[in-house]
Image: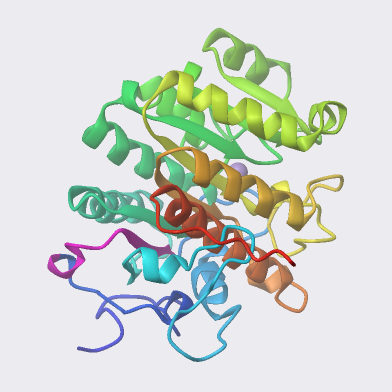
Amino acid sequence: MQPFRPHEPGFAGVGVTYCRVPLVLDPAGLRGADVVVVGAPFDDGTSNRPGTRFGPRAIRMAEDVGPPPWRPHMDLGIEPFAALRVVDHGDIEAVPGDLLTSHRLLNATITDILAVNAVPVILGGDHSLSLPVMRALAAHHGADNYAVIHFDTHTDTGSEVYGLTTSHGTPFYQAVEEGVLRGDHLMQIGLRGAWPGPTEFDWMRRHGIHWRTMEECLDHGIDAVIREAITFAEDRAPRTYLTVDVDVLDPAFAPGTGTPEPGGFQTRELLRAVRRIASSLDVCAMDVVEVSPPYDVAGITALAAHRVALETISGIAHRRGGAPRPERSA
Ligand SMILES: [Mn+2]
């Protein structure tokens, strides 16, 4: 089999698979997988600096140490690639300049992955991709049956951005208004900066959306906010969609993104947070979005995103059992 799809743009395609897991481009080959990595190489939903179409490949290439996957986690005490069957499904054949078609293609791919009871791990791409993901989750599980934990600088609850209703600033507004996401099942963490404003926050209150600003994370302590998020999600639904906009990180740790905002999480705090969430909750889908390699420095943003996915996969492996043996000194 060719290691690419016939209609994928030149900037798309795996380059190397995620952690060198097997490449499975044929949807029929996904059966039996526990986790399916897929790239969503589009950035037509971006309001400011584009470039996240280059994200999936950069994230996969961020760490390529060569041999087949072997990543013993010294804190969780498990080896995720031994505990789970993880495959890379390549990138969707995004159509440059046609965001709605790219969304339909991603929705179809996520639907295929959910149909075999695997967890999609989506490498973005801009955050508009959460809309087709939530449409697939609602169709498969029902909107009542999943919660969302959303790390971001921004709420992404605009009714429109520059007149466009489908944008990386609107997916959670659209999903609630469409009925594919319950507002009272959504918790957002890390909000800061100057967007959005009172109109959007009023809409969020009306729909029962819960959030913790970055200021509240510092006031309460990040661990306390993560415990709150886990309780929030498990009280509302049997499974959780984890969506991570890399701009929740401080630009010192993640300069390679389209809408950076100073004053955010450190990488180690985000990695610990997603690990705890995936260890505690039934994560039914996750993504890491808004990695824009043209603005990256030394690949640190792509590497942070790579590790956000790896910590999530490791947490999923930990939650599903095995024999944990954290590496602690005698
Ligand atoms: Mn976002």
The residue positioned 35% from the left and 43% from the top of the image is 132
Above or below, comparing residue 44 to residue 299 in the picture: above
Residue 33 covered by magenta stretch: yes
The total number of labels drawn is: 0
Residue numbers of the magenta segment: 28-40
Residue 271: horizontal and vertical position, in percent? 66, 54
The residue positioned 24% from the left and 80% from the top of the image is 6
Apparent side of residue 329 relative to residue 279 in the rendered image (left or right)? right
Apparent side of residue 6 relative to residue 157 in the rendered image (left or right)? left
Q: Residue furthest front?
A: 330
Colour convention = rainbow
Residue 204: horizontal and vertical position, in percent? 59, 17
Residue 164 in view in this figure: yes
Residue 322 covered by magenta stretch: no
Q: Residue furthest left?
A: 28
Residue 158: horizontal and vertical position, in percent? 58, 29
Q: Quadrant of the C terminus?
A: bottom right
Residue 17: horizontal and vertical position, in percent? 42, 79
Above or below, comparing residue 171 to residue 5 in the picture: above
Viewer-proximal residue among 75 and 232:
75
Viewer-proximal residue among 191 and 323:
323
